[in-house]
Structures are given as structure tokens and as C-alpha cells.
DNA sequence: CACCCGCTTGACCGCCGGGTCAAGGCAGCG
DNA sequence: CGCTGCCTTGACCCGGCGGTCAAGCGGGTG
């Protein structure tokens, strides 16, 4: 019997089942990122996917968990794109630029999806603390942060970036990417994607290593 | 009769009434910024303010409108702080730095309040388009953006900032402020406020005017 | 064929929360 | 003293939405 209420319940899925689950995730991604989490009804997702409402609860325990799974999957994809773009031989500063530009491009290619990661920021103050989602989200931001922090530290050791709290630099790098992501999605910016990526890359490089006249 | 359902209804408030309204706004600000809009119940606000639930609807037509009023008030305060910090005699680049640093300080002093402006970002994709709140929010971001765009353009004309889409630069400036705001509030950053402001100011200056080695 | 099991359905439930309303205080004023 | 209008209360309403469930379907296996 599978309709039970076991807490740590595992389901085995056939190939068809996995496909169906992905359909639901896809539909949810589109809706969440266009209407937002709170304004997206389970019923909407089902309508979009062309299935009955109850089916969602065959694949996901709760709406929150569905959302969390989306976020996890997005994070994975993004990190893969970043890793692929970063030349392991290059110096840390260059790697930061590569990762940054890759993020921008990725975000442009997956606007709908990427919007979710942007919601991420808000969600962790929107959702009550202690909710399982909040944990996933918070933990996620940390991943990026520590990554960049490490790169910044390396760059500082090589004299590529002036001294100063690496944490601060990291916040700046991550923040600017997410800001441009948001702006692009909002449509207040209509530039060529590669052009934008280059701009952001340059922005980050200057902010990290650039020199400016004394105050 | 005042309990009616007139659409463009105006109420006259006594001094006491205005105070009470402010109490409600204050309570709402704290709750919204800590628990988020969606997770804050009207009942919570009333409990925090020590009044009965019905009273909210004496002062505000809906929960959304209450939120919108908060946002408007915050925007006003922030802009005042910025204006006060910017030396009208200074060059545009310096003015940007001054405005940036003032924003950071302001945000630190009014963490609870300022969180709202951060929610702003998310809210305009979280709330369904067409909701009156969305309009207020969107219009608000524009105000800052055009402000910064103008300053950037001036700076470019004076050769202080290299050529390029001013819109892009503006997004970068606004984004970085909001990012650091968010990080500070999250507690992942515990630096002295003035120190942080100086860092952000420097960051923006370098990103706008700094030079870096060729690619 | 019979049985299991993954899958699918849609009516149904219960709660939560935004919003309403009738009924009062309590000033100030004529 | 009564009246008018601002303010305050708390019980109540009701629609929406997350989540449940009993029932049925279909393909694979013994």
C-alpha cells in the first residue's frame, strides 16, 4: 500500500513516472517564476501539466518540497555551467570572471528557471524560519559564497586583489550577478546577452582589481 | 455613515487617529520585514499593536494597501537621506559615492524597515501583475534607476566614467547596494557599518571608473 | 487469468485568513 | 443632555487552497 502516511516514504518510479515528475517540475518552474510561489496554486500546476490535482501528491509530499526540489535542480545546473566555464589552469581572478560570465549567460538562457534562484533571496526572508525550504535555500547561498570566497582569497595571495575581507568581495560578486539577472528579466534591459555578460565580467574585474583615484 | 463601501473613500483623522495609524504601520513594518509579507497575518499586526483586528480596516482598505503605504513611506525616507548626503557642488561620481554610502548607512540604521525595500524586488515578481502594489513597487525602482542614470551620464560627459550604456552602470550600482543590504541583514556579515559603507563606496567607484588590465 | 503495483482521477475536507459588520464607547459641541 | 462623528471591538462570514482518499485503470509477471 502506497497511499500511506509514512514519514520517510520512498517511492519507486518507472520510467514513465520519472518523466511525469519532470513534467510537473517543468510546469511548476514556469508558473513559479512568472506568478511567484505564493500566487501559484497546485491546481494551476496540474492544469498546465494536464493532470489531475491529486497526482502532485504522488510525486511530492508538499508544495514546499516541490519548490525545494526545483531549487536544488537549478542549483545543480548552474554549478555545472559555472564549472564548465572555468579554466582550471587560469588564475583565480580570471576564473571568477569566467564563472560570472557563465552565470549571466546561463541565466539568460534559462530565464524562467533562473527566476527561481532570484526568488530564493526573498524566499528566505519570506518563509518562516524553520521551514525546510528555508534551510535548502540558505544552504544554497552558502555554497556559492564559500566558492567565491576561496577564489578571492587565492587571488589576494597572488596579489591580484587588494587585501580586505574576502567575504565582502564575494557578496559583491554574487550580488551583481543576481542584480543583472533580475534587471534583464524585468525587461528594463534589452541588450545582447554576450554583451551583457562581458559588461558584468568587466564590472566585477574592475570592482575586484581596478584602481581609482584616491578619495 | 463611514462603514460604507465607497471606492474613493477618504477618511478624516484626528491627531490620535494619525498616531494609531502610525502604530499599525510600525508594527506591520517589523512583522513584514521579519516574517515576510505572505507570512504576516493581519491578526499578527493587531496583536503586536495591541488592538482589535477590525481596526486595521478603519485605517487601510486592504492588507495590500497597508503594505504599499509602508513602501511609499520608506522610499521617501531613503530618498531624503540620499539627498542630504549628496553634496550638490560635487562632481557626479562623488555624488554617486555619497548616495551609495548614505544608502548603506541608512539601511543599517533601519534594518527592519529597509528589509521591505528588499522584499520589493521579489514582490514585483511574486505578486500578480495588475495588482496595485506591483505598480507602486515598479514605479519606485524606476525612480532610483533614472536618478542614477542621470548621474552616470553626467559623469560620462565629464570623462569620469567610460562610455557605455548608462542603464547598465545604474543597475550595477543599485544592485550592489541592495546586495550588501541583504547580506548585512542576513547576519552573514558582521562588519562595522561605516566600514561597510566605505567598502561599498569604493567598490562602486572602482566598478564605475576603475581601470584594470586588458583582457 | 489473477494479481500486484505504479499510476491517475476528481470529489471532498478542513482550516486558515482576509475582510465585514453591528454594536458600543467617548469626545466635543450646541 | 442629546447628538454627531471618530474610534474600537470581537464575533462572524466565506472563499480559496493545500492536502486526502477511495476508487479505478493498465501493463507486466507468474
Image: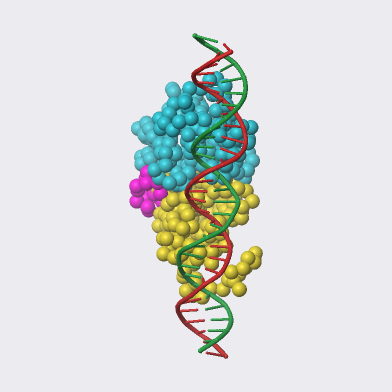
Chain colours: A cyan, B yellow, C red, D green
Vertical position of residue B33 compared to residue D2: above or below: above
Horizontal and vertical percent position of residue A120 = 48, 40
Q: Can I make out residue B192 in this image?
A: yes
Q: Position of residue A56 (x, y in %)?
A: 54, 33
Q: Nearer the viewer, residue A211 or A56?
A: A56
Looking at the image, residue B49 lies above or below residue A17: below
The N terminus of chain B: image quadrant: bottom right
- Residue under the image location 60 percent in, 33 percent down: A52
Please tell me whether the stretch drawn in magenta is mainly helix, strand or loop.
helix
Q: Tell me what residue is drawn at x 61 percent, y 52 percent.
A: B131
Total residue callouts: 0
Return the x and y of residue B52 as percentages of the image width and height: 46, 64
**Of residues D17 and B113, the one drawn nearer to the viewer in this rendering:** D17
Asked if residue C24 is positioned above or below residue B61 in the image, the reply reads below
Estimate the x, y position of residue A83 in percent, counting from the top left.
47, 26
| Residue nearer the viewer, B3 or D21 | D21
Q: Is residue A148 magenta?
A: no
Residue B89: in sight, yes or no? no
Looking at the rendering, the stretch of residues picked out in magenta corresponds to: B185-205
Q: Residue at x 48, y 37 (%)?
A: A62
Q: Residue at x 56, y 73 (%)?
A: B12
Amino acid at each position: 500500500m502506497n497511499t500511506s502516511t509514512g514519514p520517510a516514504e520512498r517511492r519507486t518510479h518507472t520510467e514513465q513516472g520519472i518523466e511525469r515528475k519532470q513534467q510537473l517540475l517543468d510546469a511548476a518552474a514556469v508558473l513559479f517564476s512568472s506568478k511567484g510561489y505564493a500566487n501559484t496554486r497546485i491546481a494551476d500546476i496540474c492544469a498546465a501539466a494536464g493532470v489531475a490535482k491529486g497526482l502532485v501528491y504522488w510525486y511530492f509530499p508538499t508544495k514546499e518540497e516541490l519548490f525545494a526540489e526545483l531549487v536544488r535542480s537549478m542549483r545543480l545546473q548552474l554549478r555545472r555551467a559555472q564549472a564548465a566555464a572555468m579554466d582550471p589552469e587560469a588564475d583565480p581572478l580570471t576564473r571568477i570572471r569566467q564563472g560570472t560570465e557563465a552565470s549571466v549567460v546561463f541565466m539568460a538562457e534559462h530565464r524562467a528557471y533562473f527566476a527561481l534562484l532570484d526568488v530564493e533571496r526573498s524566499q528566505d526572508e519570506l518563509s518562516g524560519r524553520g521551514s525546510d525550504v528555508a534551510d535548502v535555500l540558505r544552504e544554497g547561498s552558502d555554497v556559492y559564497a564559500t566558492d567565491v570566497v576561496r577564489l578571492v582569497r587565492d587571488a589576494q595571495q597572488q596579489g591580484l586583489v587588494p587585501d580586505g575581507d574576502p567575504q565582502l568581495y564575494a557578496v559583491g560578486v554574487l550580488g551583481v550577478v543576481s542584480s543583472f539577472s533580475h534587471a534583464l528579466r524585468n525587461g528594463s534591459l534589452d541588450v545582447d546577452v554576450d554583451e551583457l555578460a562581458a559588461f558584468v565580467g568587466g564590472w566585477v574585474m574592475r570592482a575586484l582589481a581596478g584602481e581609482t583615484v584616491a578619495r
